[in-house]
Amino acid sequence: MSDWSLRLARPKDADAMPAIERAAGEVFGAIEGIEHIANGDTLPVEKLQRYIRKGHCLVAHVGDTLAGFLVNEPFRRELHIWEMSVHPRFQKRGIGAGLVRACLIDARNSGFAAATLTTFHDVPWNAPFYGKLGFEEVSALDAHPRLAGELALEADNGLPAERRCAMIAFLD
């Protein structure tokens, strides 16, 4: 039995999410070429609340403490994961994998055809992590214009395009 639990996020949970995202992002400070992410912006509380109101975002608790979260947004028949963060104090317990698996179950049960995300293909806790959970790298971005657009926007915002990828998990 695990010492953590999952539930749907509530709008008031958004207040604690930026601190978790910031703490989880600190590990990027040790990766050459993307150190700036460690001190980067987090998702604004207002935007997090909008995602939460759409009904598919999840949080993980250890006791009464919010330990991690996954925020996503529906796009037609796909559920796009915008952010998944687990506070470093609670990592290595399966919480991140639990959040992603629960997201995929919810997406399947809600009738979505796929779940999508963008991430770093060369960071072990990014694309390789998601690959173990059923995501595959999108190689034909021309067939996924929304994801191609997201990657282009990320590059415009300073993320190295050559290190980024889009991933998809089909839910059939």
Image (cartoon, rainbow, N blue to C red):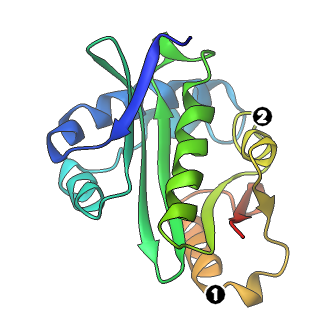
Measured in 3D between alpha carbons, the distance from the residue under mark 1 to the one under mark 2, in whole angstroms, is 26 Å
**Nearer the N terminus, badge 1 or badge 2?**
2
Residue that label 2 marks: 124
- Mark identifier at residue 95: none
Residue 61 image point, x, y percent: 36, 22
**Res. 138 in view:** yes
* Residue type at tag 2: Pro
Residue 17 image point, x, y percent: 30, 36
Residue shown at 29%/43% (left/top)?
Answer: 9
Q: Is residue 85 above or below residue 134?
A: above
Q: Quadrant of the N terminus?
A: top right
Residue shown at 32%/11% (left/top)?
Answer: 63
Position of 117 compared to 17: left or right?
Answer: right
Q: Circle 1: is it few (<14), some (14-19), or many (20+) Cα within 10 Å? A: few
* Residue type at tag 1: Pro
Residue 52 image point, x, y percent: 27, 54
Q: Circle 2: is it few (<14), some (14-19), or many (20+) Cα within 10 Å? A: few
Q: Is residue 110 above or below residue 126?
A: below
- Between 71 and 23, the residue placed more toward the observer is 71
- Between 39 and 6, the residue placed more toward the observer is 6
Position of 105 compared to 128: left or right?
Answer: left
Q: In this view, does 23 lie above or below 63?
A: below
Residue that label 1 marks: 145
Residue shown at 58%/44% (left/top)?
Answer: 100
**Res. 153 in view:** no
